[in-house]
Image (cartoon, helix red, strand yellow):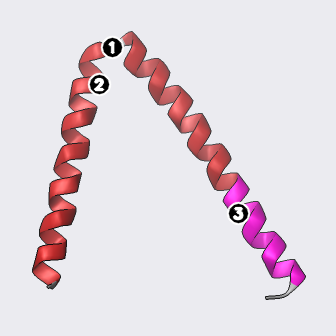
Amino acid sequence: MAKGSMMSVVKVAAGGMLAGMVVGAAGKAMIDKKPKMRKKANRAIHTVGQIIDTAQYMFK
């Protein structure tokens, strides 16, 4: 891998981490203000996990 392309990968990874931290901080602030949202978020995450499990089962 050339030096320039490696630097691009590092920049993209750093940008993604920064964006994730911003979204995480905003999400935490929202959940702290509205505890009911935490329950809904947990339910949504559980549902997405089930969908992924089902998709993996279908491709076996």
x, y percent for residue 42: 24, 35
Looking at the image, the residue that sits furthest to the right is 3
Q: Residues within 10 Å of mark 3 (few under 14, many from 20)?
A: few
Identify residue for label 1: 34
Amino acid type, mark 2: Arg
Q: CA distance from mark 3 to mark 1?
A: 33 Å
- Residue plotted at (43% across, 20% down): 30
The quadrant of the image that shows the N terminus is bottom right
Q: Residues within 10 Å of mark 1 (few under 14, many from 20)?
A: few
The quadrant of the image that shows the C terminus is bottom left
In the rendered image, residue 9 lying in the magenta stretch gets the answer yes
Identify the mark nearer the N-term, 3 or 1: 3
x, y percent for residue 5: 80, 80
Identify residue for label 3: 12
Identify the mark nearer the N-term, 3 or 2: 3
User: Which residues are drawn in magenta?
Assistant: 3-14
Q: How many marks?
A: 3
- Residue plotted at (72% across, 55% down): 14
x, y percent for residue 28: 46, 24
Amino acid type, mark 3: Val
Identify residue for label 2: 38
Amino acid type, mark 1: Lys
Element under disc 1: loop
In the rendered view, does 37 fall on the left or right side of 56? Answer: right
Of labels 2 and 1, the one closer to you: 2
* Above/below status of 57 relative to 29: below
In which image quadrant can residue 7 be found? bottom right
* Above/below status of 6 relative to 20: below
Q: CA distance from mark 3 to mark 2?
A: 30 Å
In the rendered view, does 28 fall on the left or right side of 13? Answer: left
Q: Are marks 2 and 1 in contact (CB under 8 Å)?
A: yes
